[in-house]
Structure formats: C-alpha cells, structure tokens
Image (spheres, helix red, strand yellow):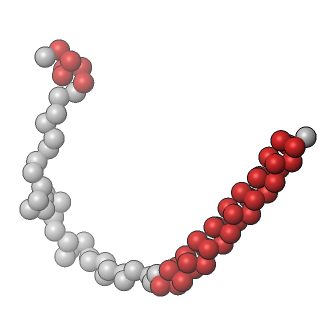
Amino acid sequence: MLNGMATREAAIISYSNDYLLMCIVTLFAVPLVLLLRKAASTPVTAPSQAAPPSQAPPSYAGPITAKPPSQAASN
C-alpha cells in the first residue's frame, strides 16, 4: 500500500516536472520562430540564358565508377 502511494506520487511529480520543462522550452522557442524570415527568392532565368545541360559545373568529377555488389564480391 505504501509502495503504491509512493509510486503514484513520484509519477505525479515527474509529469509536473516534464510539463514545466516543456513550457520553458516553448517559451524560449517562440521568440526564435519570430526571428525566422522568409528566404529571398532567386530570379528565374529564361531557358535561353541558362547554361546548356552538356556543360557540367567545374566541381563535377565525372561518373561514379564503383562496382556493383555482385562484381565486388567476386574479387
């Protein structure tokens, strides 16, 4: 009987502490949400002004040449 009462009281205290923690986190998060702003939109270029698809960006190193798993297991 005493064990059940202590367990029930511990559960009530833990829920109370969790609720308080969620309230504090929410109170700190709301001002951060208000600081967010909409991203600047980038102008859309016409297809005639866009780079042709055959030209890859300078950082492109070529196709990946990894072997499929079936060939890698045989080596």
Q: Compared to 22, does 5 lie above or below?
A: above
- Residue 67 x, y percent position in the rendering: 17, 28
Q: Residue at x 13, y 36 (%)?
A: 65
- Residue 12 x, y percent position in the rendering: 79, 57
- Residue 26 x, y percent position in the rendering: 61, 73
Q: Residue at x 80, y 46 (%)?
A: 7
Furthest-right residue in this view: 1
Q: Residue at x 17, y 14 (%)?
A: 74
Dividing the image into 4 quarters, which one contains the N terminus? top right
Report if residue 55 is visible in the image: no
Judging depth in this view, the residue of 14 and 47 nearest the camera is: 14
Q: Is residue 69 left or right of residue 3?
A: left
Judging depth in this view, the residue of 48 and 63 nearest the camera is: 63
The answer to which quarter of the image holds residue 69 is top left
Report if residue 13 is visible in the image: yes
Judging depth in this view, the residue of 59 and 31 nearest the camera is: 31
Dividing the image into 4 quarters, which one contains the C terminus? top left
Q: Is residue 62 left or right of residue 10?
A: left
Furthest-top residue in this view: 74
Q: Residue at x 83, y 41 (%)?
A: 3
The answer to which quarter of the image holds residue 16 is bottom right
How many numbered marks, from 0 up?
0
- Residue 47 x, y percent position in the rendering: 24, 72
Q: Is residue 32 left or right of residue 69?
A: right
Q: Is residue 21 left or right of residue 12?
A: left
